[in-house]
Image (tube, helix red, strand yellow):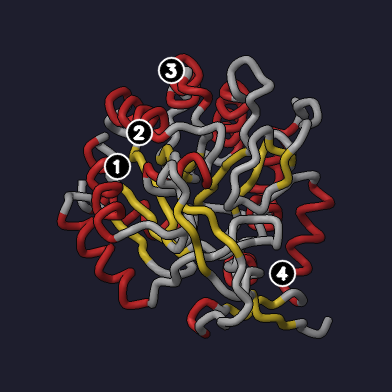
């Protein structure tokens, strides 16, 4: 099959913003300015990427790589790396930055843990990352389903490492405990943005509640690495970014990812403030200075980007 190429271009082709009375930045598209070339990434739609997509459909599993329109999809798929997305492809929240569909989700597929394990075995994964849509419609937010996936993966791939990227479970500590009881090697929960922008970027979520998830996870399971991540480009200041890193580190979280926001669709928030590549090295050095054991920072870094390498790096520093 011929390889098909395209450049992933943030769909907002310009940027400007206005400050509202609440202090929340509201983005509007300004087409008079083109995006800088460092925000473009080539995506290969054919070849290994197409073949892996076809295999995943035949196995009945979903990935956030596809649903969230990740810019790294061909890079990761060609290396046999992916992030499973469980509990369907429809989220009960409607975050302004996210490309995953929102609305009324379907019933849980109780065979999904076995399907995910079968796919992981078929792909011979040594590092398995599992995330989910947010399921506020479920009493436990889907914690039992996460736990079932971890257990089933452990039974079928004893040597593999497991990372779970969880929602906030509406702050339910019992739900979080159920996931941690499965003893994932890494438990991740993303803060995503600075506190001031939460009403715009993450409606339905809460900054302090998400910090509480990281704090609880760090305190309950010292052997589990705790990880978080955020993006820049939505109008945050350097002072706000540094405060965000301090807040995350204060929870005991030891792993951090920092990436650049790229609007996945025209319906999402548009880009406000492009950050050149050099700034990400500065953010990385600041984060390491705060005591994080492992930091991935770059324009196309996402929560599970090169996750296995990051986990190994954090383990070496323990």
Q: Which residue is mark 4?
A: 49
Q: Position of residue 289 (x, y in %)?
A: 15, 57
Q: Crowdedness of circle 4 by 10 Å Cα count: few (<14), some, many (20+)? A: many
Q: Secondary structure at mark 1?
A: helix
Front position in the image: 294 or 297: 297
> In terms of secondary structure, where does tag 4 sit?
helix
The residue that disc 1 covers is 248
Q: Is residue 225 above or below residue 26?
A: above
Q: How many marks?
A: 4
Q: Looking at the rendering, in which quadrant would you find the C terminus?
A: top left
Residue 299 visible at all: yes
Q: Are marks 4 and 2 in contact (CB under 8 Å)?
A: no
Q: Earlier in the sequence, mark 1 or mark 2?
A: 2
Name the element at disc 3: helix
From the viewer's side, name the closer residue of 315 and 62. 62
State which quadrant residue 147 falls in: top right
Q: CA distance from mark 3 to mark 4?
A: 38 Å
Q: Earlier in the sequence, mark 1 or mark 4?
A: 4
**Mark 1 neighbour density, 10 Å: few (under 14) some (14–19) many (20 or more):** many
Q: Nearer the viewer, mark 1 or mark 4?
A: 1
Q: Earlier in the sequence, mark 3 or mark 4?
A: 4
Q: Which structural element holds mark 2? A: helix
Relative to the observer, which residue lies in front, 102 or 2?
102
Q: CA distance from mark 3 to mark 2?
A: 13 Å
Classify residue 91 as left or right of residue 295.
right
């Amino acid at each position: 099959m011929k390889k098909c190429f395209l450049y992933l271009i943030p769909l907002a082709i310009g940027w400007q913003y206005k400050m509202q009375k609440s202090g929340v930045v509201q983005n509007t598209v300004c087409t008079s300015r083109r995006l800088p070339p460092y925000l473009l990434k080539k995506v290969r739609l054919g070849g290994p990427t197409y073949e892996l997509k076809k295999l995943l459909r035949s196995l009945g599993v979903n990935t956030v790589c596809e649903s969230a329109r990740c810019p790294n999809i061909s890079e990761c798929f060609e290396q046999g790396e992916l992030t499973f997305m469980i509990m369907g492809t429809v989220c009960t929240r409607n975050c302004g930055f996210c490309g995953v569909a929102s609305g009324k989700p379907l019933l849980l597929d109780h065979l999904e843990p076995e399907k995910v394990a079968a796919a992981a075995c078929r792909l011979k994964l040594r590092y398995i990352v599992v995330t989910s849509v947010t399921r506020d419609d479920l009493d436990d937010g889907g914690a039992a389903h996460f736990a079932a996936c971890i257990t089933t993966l452990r039974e079928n791939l004893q040597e593999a490492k497991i990372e779970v990227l969880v929602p906030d479970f509406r702050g339910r500590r019992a739900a979080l405990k159920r996931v941690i009881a499965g003893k994932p090697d890494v438990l991740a929960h993303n803060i995503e943005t600075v506190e001031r922008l939460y009403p715009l970027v993450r409606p339905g979520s809460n900054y302090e509640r998400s910090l509480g998830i990281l704090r609880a996870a760090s305190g309950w399971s010292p052997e589990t690495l705790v990880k978080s991540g955020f993006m820049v480009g939505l109008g945050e200041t350097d002072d706000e970014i540094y405060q965000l890193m301090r807040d995350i580190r204060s929870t005991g979280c030891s792993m951090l990812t920092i990436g650049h926001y790229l609007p996945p669709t025209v319906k999402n928030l548009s880009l406000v403030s492009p950050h050149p590549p050099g700034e990400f090295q500065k953010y990385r050095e600041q984060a390491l200075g705060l005591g994080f054991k492992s930091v991935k920072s770059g324009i196309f870094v996402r929560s599970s980007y090169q996750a296995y390498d990051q986990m190994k790096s954090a383990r070496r520093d323990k």
